Amino acid sequence: MDWQGWFSLGLAGTALILMSSGRFAPHMVMMGVLVVLSVSGVVSPDQALSGFSNSGLITVVALFVVAAGIHHSGGVDLLVHYLLRSPKTVRSAQARIALPVSFLSGFLNNTPVVATMIPAVHAWSRKIGVSPSKLMIPLSYSAILGGTLTLIGTSTNLVVNGQYQQLTGSEGFSIFSITSVGLPVAVIGVAVMLLVLPRVLPDRKDQQKFGSMREFTLEVAVSFDGPLVGKSVGEAGLRELERLYLVEIERDGSVVTAVPSEERLRGGDRLVFAGDTQAISDLLRINGIVPSVHEDEPSLSKDRAERRLVEAALSPQSDVLGLTIRDARFRDRYGAVVLAVARGGERVSGNLGNIRLKPGDVLLLEARPAFVSRQRYNKDFLLINDLDTETPRHDRAWLSWGVLVVLVGLAACGVLSMLNAALLGATLMILLGCCSIIQAQKAVDIPVVLTIASSFALGAALQQTGAATYVAEGILGMSHGHVLLAILLVYFAVSILTEVITNNAAAVLVIPIVLSMTATMGVSPEPFVIAVMMAASASFATPLGYQTNMMVFGPGGYRFSDFLRVGLPMNLFIGLMTVLVISLVYEIGV
């Protein structure tokens, strides 16, 4: 290799380190790599920007809009209504989640599927008396396995196909090309999941004191000029609140714990409660209770009537990680006030302002309505749930499903390309009123789009400088030229990368290496590319490895160790099953 090859490899390694550190957003890292490659002349400007016009990327954008149409028309609600019902056992409850979710995720991006299902599954868990911790990991895993069923199941599949087309000049894969591998793996994976998970998942229902999705730590204050000043805790009605418990009172630098009902309230007292979202909403309606403010500036109380409660989960790339709530200055940064925080389904002890923020923390914010539209796709937040949600257009639910069926049918029959079918589907969703233009705009995940588009520049650099060939020869040396062993090594290399960086970035980095390997070995690249698609999607071991895992982390009340205990064996099992099925489908000798 010349200096450009070593430079590209060094840049790829630097990008991996920066993304795995969690301090830098993947899309910013990959955009930086694009700029460096273009300015240094390693790739031409056309190559640097080729990802932004790639058909795979445009298809991903269009399918975000299709998913928005299903979501905002209440299409998922139909499945919930007709399929969940009243199971008799935990295994039956998990099965009722797994089957529709895995099917849905085969045709829709699994992130909005899980986002839509979380509140529905949680409410259902209370109704049937099953702990959310028994249901939320199956929800995420089912969505992950379902994403491997078709080419449009995840953005990763489409991106890999787009890069494969770009680097080889071939027509790429059809919508069901991956199904011959993905379907048996998904069926076996779901079966094993239903066999094992009911016994190994924690049952934290008893720990959820108020039977709620998560137990928030909430801090409020007694208004100096309010009617509660001078009243006892009992007289103020603060001992009679359902699903809400007064933990302590902070006053003049001292803390009153095990608060007696006779304790008199004073203006400025900070009251620390533990409870669920609905109970907190009830508490904030009490005259004389105001949000506890941690900034020097006044709160937004003057226009409080115009504000709303919003739940927001912090992402691993958030700028406020490691800061205390007081130092994060949410009012200046986001125009919002932190009212409460939940971590792993349990309350966080201590003064609210001194709590240090961690990935996956769920914050209850009081903010203006514009906060939701402004921050929904901010890298700082994984999931924003406006508690005053818009009412779905239920009269369009069946229509939205019809659009999806038409889209898939046209692509499967070869009448339209995957790109044109997705564009047609997105257009029909808007024209038929399944979602508004504003909802369609919000549905497009800009950081994901930028990560995908900019990753193509690094892939092109690795390919044309010979760096990919260099790495491929190293992997071939370990496999001793054995095709199946090479596929196994590629699979687990991508699987490990997916746990530390984004799945899209991991896949795009490996595809040039795979193409160099197969060219050297003189074999078809198709089984290797399928292995990359499967490995980049099948991430079960940590909540950080896949976005849907992080989304269910808080609602399920999980700890990091829960994912390791359940997900690590799942990663290994699905990996071995995938390679086995690939060997059978493509008749590769063991």
Image (cartoon, rainbow, N blue to C red):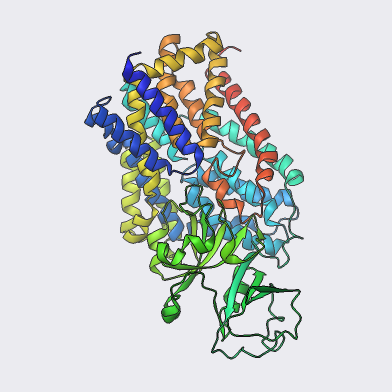
**Total marks in image:** 0
Residue at the image point whose x is 26% and y is 35% from the top: 49
Image position, residue 563 (x, y; %)? 65, 43
For residue 127, above or below residue 301: above
Determine which quarter of the picture holds residue 156: top left
For residue 300, above or below residue 495: below
The N terminus lies in which quarter of the figure?
Answer: top left
User: Given the current orientation, which residue lies at the most extreme left position?
Assistant: 45
Image position, residue 165 (x, y; %)? 34, 27
Report whether residue 171 is seen: no
Residue at the image point whose x is 62% and y is 33% from the top: 571
Determine which quarter of the picture holds residue 158: top left
Which of 500/54 is in front?
500
Is 501 positioned to the left or the right of 424 in the image?
right
User: Given the current orientation, which residue lies at the most extreme front position?
Assistant: 253
For residue 158, above or below residue 584: below
Residue at the image point whose x is 40% and y is 23% from the top: 9
Residue at the image point whose x is 46% and y is 32% from the top: 16
The C terminus lies in which quarter of the figure?
Answer: top right
Which of 427/416 is in front?
427
Is 199 positioned to the left or the right of 190 in the image?
right
Is 511 positioned to the left or the right of 570 in the image?
left
Is 203 positioned to the left or the right of 30 in the image?
right
Image position, residue 171 (x, y; %)? 33, 26
For residue 191, above or below residue 343: above
Image position, residue 146 (x, y; %)? 54, 41
Determine which quarter of the picture holds residue 130: bottom right
Report whether residue 139 is seen: yes
Which of 257/117 is in front?
257
